[in-house]
């Protein structure tokens, strides 16, 4: 007789737990007849790690899917619009060449994989000397000028320029808690899990808690969102951890909240990532404050030195602000799904916050779980196999892309940068790509896997923003659409002119959204 999967228990809240709860509840229609039921148990004493978080444009689809009003979400989570990231001083030592930077916007005007790849024509000088990011993406113009990605009359979740959000992680978790419990039928229990009960077959049967009313919670399927401790998948089921410390070195962050100097101060419409001698700082503009932090390697730097650099970056106001230290476990589980348990969030993996991939991978995991959800136990082994294969690939490729920012840098001013550039620390898959790209620009054929988290355009912005050299001397004749390329570069410049007269400033739009919201689609 087949055993049905009728009850899901999520252990752990925060951004990971509540995003998973919302996506599963909405996509599995938990209030429908004969649907699965979802319970989330969350510790009342363990704080969430969140600082001020960046998201990917997929978050717009997620919020729509779970039935969230965009204006209400932005207002309650102090959210602002994000159109990409600016990388400052990553290419060279600024003491030698001065301050420099490039943008990694959320989209190009012409997507290289399925429209027209401008990169080879930029390399051949058809862009008139403009930097690659500026020549191919109007979002560089909007970011530099502090413009929002849309207007107050643009319907909710629709865009003029592609966008995601910056948000307050604590407020976001609280917002999702209310939404999931009040609107999506998720049962919420605040309790500490004291024991995980595993049956003779290796499947989890339930958990014991310190809650008087709910001392035991049973379920058919379990989602581990308990953070780096991984109570279910790691401790109870014994799934090991694969460290990436030999590739990615940054294992610590110092975070601080910086108030604006005035209520009408401009709000950056992109994440600002500035490289320093022993790490990098993030700078995220929320509505009433900035979230600023220093990411560094404890193997290359003591906390005092990292904090000194962070406070110097903030300026005079940074001398008295409180700093919170966050430690990272760098790596990922050797399995993400085992038997009737899957891990998401820090229970599954963590790679430093550069490029803000963490929340996207939670969304991706929850969506695959919903899409492939095994309603009978007999289906679990096949779904487990598919899930583990896909997410091992996704995390490997995420490591590649993060490492790219470091290994092609020309900085060698400290041991930190020397070690980051050491070829022995670069994954073989990335080394092979880089070697090929020295003689041929990246193309869509380099990114033919459906679950590649970072695609062709992402690599092009970083490669050529960092000054990577591709020699087309022997291959120039393969690119014969110069006139079309020049017309496309011109279209980007013309779009910049239109956007300058059409888009409001970031703060102007955010204030209106908080007050009025967006019109419904």
Image (spheres, rainbow, N blue to C red):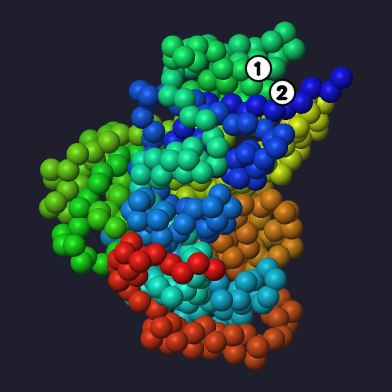
Q: Residue furthest right?
A: 1
Q: Position of residue 356 (x, y in %)?
A: 47, 50
Front of the two marks 2 and 1? 1
Check the image and report above or below for 235 versus 513: above
Camera-nearest residue between 412 and 172: 172
Q: Image quadrant for the N terminus?
A: top right
Q: Is residue 95 visible?
A: yes
Q: Are marks 2 and 1 in contact (CB under 8 Å)?
A: yes
The residue positioned 71% from the left and 14% from the top of the image is 202
Quadrant location of residue 171? top left
Secondary structure type for disc 1 = strand
Q: Image quadrant for the C terminus?
A: bottom right
**89 left or right of 42?**
left
The residue positioned 35% from the left and 76% from the top of the image is 504
Camera-nearest residue between 49 and 422: 49
The residue positioned 66% from the left and 55% from the top of the image is 433
Q: Position of residue 68 (x, y in %)?
A: 49, 53
| Number of disc labels | 2
Instruction: List the residue tagged with mark 2.
Output: 339
User: Residue 204 bears which disc, if any?
Assistant: 1
Secondary structure type for disc 2 = loop
* Classed neighbour count for the residue bearing mark 1: other residues with Cα under 10 Å, few (<14), some (14–19), many (≥20): many
Camera-nearest residue between 416 and 494: 494
C-alpha span from label 2 to label 1 = 8 Å
Q: Position of residue 249 (x, y in %)?
A: 45, 38
**142 left or right of 478?**
left
Give the mark, 2 or 1, whose residue is nearer the N terminus.
1
Camera-nearest residue between 45 and 113: 45
User: Residue 398 bears which disc, if any?
Assistant: none
């Amino acid at each position: 007789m087949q055993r049905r999967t009728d009850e899901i228990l999520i252990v752990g809240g925060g951004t990971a737990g509540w995003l998973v709860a919302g996506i599963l509840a909405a996509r599995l229609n938990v209030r429908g007849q004969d649907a699965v039921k979802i319970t989330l148990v969350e510790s009342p004493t363990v704080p969430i790690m969140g600082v001020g978080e960046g998201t990917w444009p997929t978050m717009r689809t997620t919020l729509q899917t779970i039935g969230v009003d965009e204006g209400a979400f932005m207002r309650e989570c102090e959210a602002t619009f994000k159109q990409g990231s600016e990388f400052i001083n990553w290419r060279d030592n600024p003491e030698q060449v001065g301050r420099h930077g490039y943008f990694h916007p959320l989209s190009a005007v012409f997507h290289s994989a399925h429209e027209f790849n401008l990169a080879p024509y930029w390399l051949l000088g058809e862009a008139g000397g403009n930097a690659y990011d500026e020549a191919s993406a109007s979002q560089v113009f909007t970011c530099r000028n502090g413009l929002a990605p849309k207007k107050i009359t643009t319907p909710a979740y629709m865009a003029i320029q592609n966008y995601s959000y910056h948000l307050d992680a604590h407020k976001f978790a609280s917002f999702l808690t209310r939404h999931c419990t009040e609107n999506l039928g998720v049962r919420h229990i605040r309790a500490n899990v004291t024991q995980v009960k595993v049956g003779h077959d290796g499947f989890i049967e339930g958990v014991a808690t310190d809650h008087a009313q709910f001392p035991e919670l049973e379920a058919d399927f379990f989602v581990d969102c308990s953070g780096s401790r991984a109570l279910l998948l790691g401790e109870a089921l014994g799934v090991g951890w694969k460290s990436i410390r030999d590739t990615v070195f940054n294992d610590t962050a110092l975070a601080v909240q910086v108030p604006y100097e005035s209520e009408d101060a401009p709000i950056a419409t992109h994440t600002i990532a500035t490289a320093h001698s022993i790490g990098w700082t993030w700078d995220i503009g929320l509505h009433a404050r900035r979230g600023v932090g220093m990411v560094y390697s404890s193997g290359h730097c003591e906390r005092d030195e990292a904090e000194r650099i962070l406070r110097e970056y903030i300026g005079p106001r940074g001398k008295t602000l409180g700093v919170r230290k966050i430690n990272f476990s760098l790596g990922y589980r050797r399995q993400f799904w085992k038997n009737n348990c899957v891990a998401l969030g820090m229970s599954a993996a963590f790679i430093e916050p550069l490029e803000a991939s963490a929340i996207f991978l939670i969304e991706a995991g929850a969506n695959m779980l919903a899409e492939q959800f095994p309603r009978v136990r007999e289906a679990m082994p096949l779904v487990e196999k598919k899930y583990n294969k896909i997410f091992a690939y996704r995390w490997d490729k995420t490591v590649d892309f993060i490492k790219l920012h470091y290994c092609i840098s020309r900085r060698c001013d400290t041991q930190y940068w020397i070690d980051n550039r050491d070829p022995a620390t670069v994954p073989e898959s990335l080394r092979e790509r880089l070697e090929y790209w020295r003689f041929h620009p990246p193309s869509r054929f380099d990114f033919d896997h459906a679950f590649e988290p970072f695609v062709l355009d992402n690599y092009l912005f970083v490669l050529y923003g960092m000054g990577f050299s591709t020699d087309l001397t022997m291959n120039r004749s393969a690119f014969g659409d110069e006139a079309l390329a020049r017309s496309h570069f011109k279209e980007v410049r013309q779009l910049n002119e239109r956007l300058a007269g059409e888009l409001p400033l970031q703060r102007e739009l955010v204030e209106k959204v908080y007050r009025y919201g967006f019109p419904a689609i």
